[in-house]
Amino acid sequence: MIYVVCEPEDFFYDIYMIVSLYFPYEKVIDKKGECDISSGSMLIEVSFKLNDSTVASNCSLFVKDNMTYKSIGHCFENHTVWGSKKKSVKYCIKVSVFKLLKDYTKIEIPWGILTGIRPSKIVSELKSKAVVDGDIENILKSKYLIRNDKAKLVMKVSKNSYNLLNCDPKRISVYIDIPFCPSICLYCSFSSNPIMNWSKDMDDYMDALEYEITKCADFINKHFKVDTIYIGGGTPTSLNDCHFKRLLDIVSGSFEMDGISEFTVEAGRPDTITPSKLEAMKAAGVGRISINPQSMNDDTLKRIGRNHTSSEIVEKFRLARKLGFDYINMDMILGLPGENLDNVKYTLGSILKLSPENITVHTMAIKRASRLKEKIVKNEQVQLPPAELVEKMMDYVVETMDRSGYLPYYMYRQKMMMGNLENVGYCKSGFQCAYNIQMIEERETIAGFGAHAVSKAVFLDENRIERIANKKDVKEYMDSIKETTDNKLKAFKTLI
């Protein structure tokens, strides 16, 4: 347990996020009054001084020695105020805590003080102000303390995506969430539901989804131009053939499909892909699909709870190609339980032999509500590779993707990622997924439909985003569908 003392307490969360980079499995407590020294392993004290032009942060680290805390580190930071005073204080505190813990642990955090921020958005904002690439890279390294190789990576991502960013406030993308899966993977905490538990309620879910989409589509078609459509989840293809066909009919019957630049369906799990579903997608105008291995090692697939084999992945990929799908994404995850570098090499090599247009490389994130996190808390053996090995896996992927001609075009980070690394989408030249770019860069309004979906109303002129979240729980979503739809329409009306 790590105690934090910060006066005032407004900045505890920012300190917590930095401490969690170095001690991801430690409980971090905002100390109020006396702390229980018998349970605390460490104490961090933070204070700051602010005037009109400068902010100074003082940070001290104490480690338990018998029944007292022993001072073992100190960091003082002094910075010029920029932007709001609160933002300047927050930055100064984060840098001082970061440097103090780096000196104490000797751990190199690749993304510096960035925690919940999308790194590519920083680059895009600087580019929009006509800052040149060389200066942007220096800012990433000096201001945000990002490691050199990661700064270069995010600059490459921007190079391959910046010209595709939306500048038209009348363009909108549609996201549809199907929150069901054939089974729940070991590492997943997403609000997915085993579809067998919802078979009797599926008609009701589809009714609610149809109501929400059709009520909003009339307004969207009148005032906006639909740019991309993305059906995700969950695993949309876990629906039976009848419900899946109905889903596609709802979409194609509701939105003006002429001029849509991209229509994606997350087919995802190969055990849910059938010839009839592929044919229905083709007939509905779906151009891009995902078939996601995560690993091509059968022992790993069993271990993480995916009810398919690597041979099924290859079989369904070839079937999709045979039926005319020439734009396919495949996902893989680095840091899966029990995997080593050779396993990753085998997975990536197997995927490259299939030559998909997109390959999305995820770093394992230990999600709070996952069965994996539960096992870790219970001290069960989960065989997670160490962070150093996961970083070697990522280094191998970066080198191999570059050698194979794939370009990094979008990226994002999550909490509790192993090695504090990243997720990167790679593409063959000319195959950047437009929805992924707009979703990460938050430059285009997203209309989200279905349980767990989040709509984002983007006010480009104000550099402002308004989030409208649907209910996560499927039953609550169905019960509140009229209120959900009315709230969404009310928010969208403020855009016109």
Image: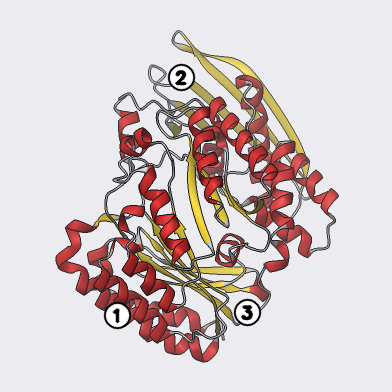
Residue at position x 52%, y 37% from top? 16
Mark 2: give few (<14), some (14-19) or many (20+) Cα within 10 Å: some
Amino acid type shown at disc 1: Lys
Sequence-first tag of 1 and 2: 2
**Mark in front: 1 vs 2:** 1
Label 2 residue SS: loop
Mark 1 and mark 2: Cα distance apart in space? 51 Å
Q: Which residue is mark 3?
A: 169
Q: Pointer 1: what residue?
A: 482
Residue 470 showing in the rendered view: no
SS label for mark 1: helix
Instruction: Please state the horizontal and vertical placement of residue 426, each as a whole percent of the image.
Output: 61, 52
Q: Quadrant of residue 141?
A: top right
Q: Relative to the observer, which residue lies in front, 286 or 129?
A: 286
Q: Earlier in the sequence, mark 3 or mark 1?
A: 3
Above or below: residue 258 compared with residue 91: below
N-terminal of the pair, mark 3 or mark 2, is 2
Please indicate whether residue 7 sits to the left or right of residue 77 in the image. left
Say which element carries label 3: loop
Depth check: give the residue in front, 284 or 191.
284
Q: Residue at x 48, y 44 (%)?
A: 332
Q: Residue type at mark 3?
A: Pro
